Image (spheres, rainbow, N blue to C red):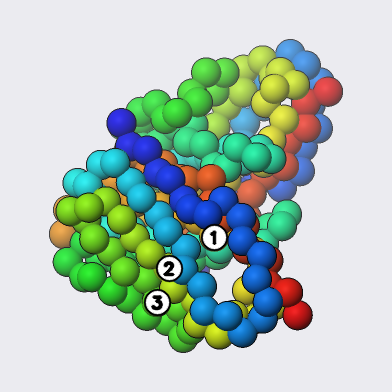
Amino acid sequence: KQEVTQIPAALSVPEGENLVLNCSFTDSAIYNLQWFRQDPGKGLTSLLLIQSSQREQTSGRLNASLDKSSGRSTLYIAASQPGDSATYLCAPLVDKIIFGKGTRLHILP
Amino acid sequence: NAGVTQTPKFQVLKTGQSMTLQCAQDMNHEYMSWYRQDPGMGLRLIHYSVGAGITDQGEVPNGYNVSRSTTEDFPLRLLSAAPSQTSVYFCASRTQGTLNTGELFFGEGSRLTVL
């Protein structure tokens, strides 16, 4: 049974800091892994998709890494901004896609 | 392309009523799924389908029925609504396959209140 854990559960930091959000999963037989953000009361926005054959994927100030063998993914946010405030979710992509509870991020101006 | 379309966006039901949440995608995705999201509980998988005619249970399937008669549509049925089913429901889809399993696309959500 897939279990997904995201650490920390919440994070509040001043603007400009570099951040690391962690995602761990128990079933390493995944196809790919996807990171999302969700603003309060809104839907999910896809941030990055890491193919199982890749180890990293970058988009702007975001960089995600994937280590299937250890069941871990990390989302790195560089030079954080107040607009980055949201809940971040990871999803190991298998047939039965389970989400973690996310990391609630608050960037202080 | 419209992507993943959910209807209705808002619905209020009385306990015991039945209804169907509709989900349609125009991307020819084999995989479709339904989630519910409650405060503090994150997204929980209700049912999913890897292709037409195939459905399977997720984490919280009780009280919900699904069917997949076409590739495009994946309706979620509440046969007798209960207040515990008050939630925001999200439908998602993606391509399926070991070599080309693509990213997951979400609909905008359907907010259901059961009185």
Q: Compute the Cα span from label 2 to label 3.
A: 6 Å
Mark before the other along the chain sequence, 2 or 3: 3
In the rendered view of the protein, which quadrant contains the N terminus of chain A? top left
Q: Compute the Cα span from label 1 to label 2.
A: 9 Å
Q: Is residue B42 above or below residue A87?
A: above
Mark before the other along the chain sequence, 3 or 1: 3
Residue B39 quadrant: top right
The residue that disc 3 covers is A63
Mark before the other along the chain sequence, 1 or 2: 2
Q: Are marks 2 and 3 in contact (CB under 8 Å)?
A: yes
Q: Are marks 1 and 2 in contact (CB under 8 Å)?
A: yes
Front residue (pair A97, B26)? A97
Q: Which mark is residue A88?
A: 1
| Amino acid beneath label 1 | Tyr
Dot 1 crowding, Cα within 10 Å, few <14, some 14–19, many 20+: many
| Residue B25 seen in render | no
Front residue (pair B93, B62)? B62
Q: Which mark is residue A75?
A: 2
Residue A53 quadrant: bottom left
Q: Is residue A107 above or below residue B30?
A: below
In the rendered view of the protein, which quadrant contains the C terminus of chain A? bottom right
> Dot 2 falls on which chain?
A
Give a yes or no on whether discs 2 and 3 share a subunit: yes
Residue A36 pos. (x, y %): 50, 62
Residue B4 pos. (x, y %): 52, 56
Residue, x 28% and y 58% (percent of image)? A32
Is B114 displayed left or right of A78 in the figure?
A: right
Badge 2 element = strand
Residue, x 73% and y 74% (percent of image)? A108
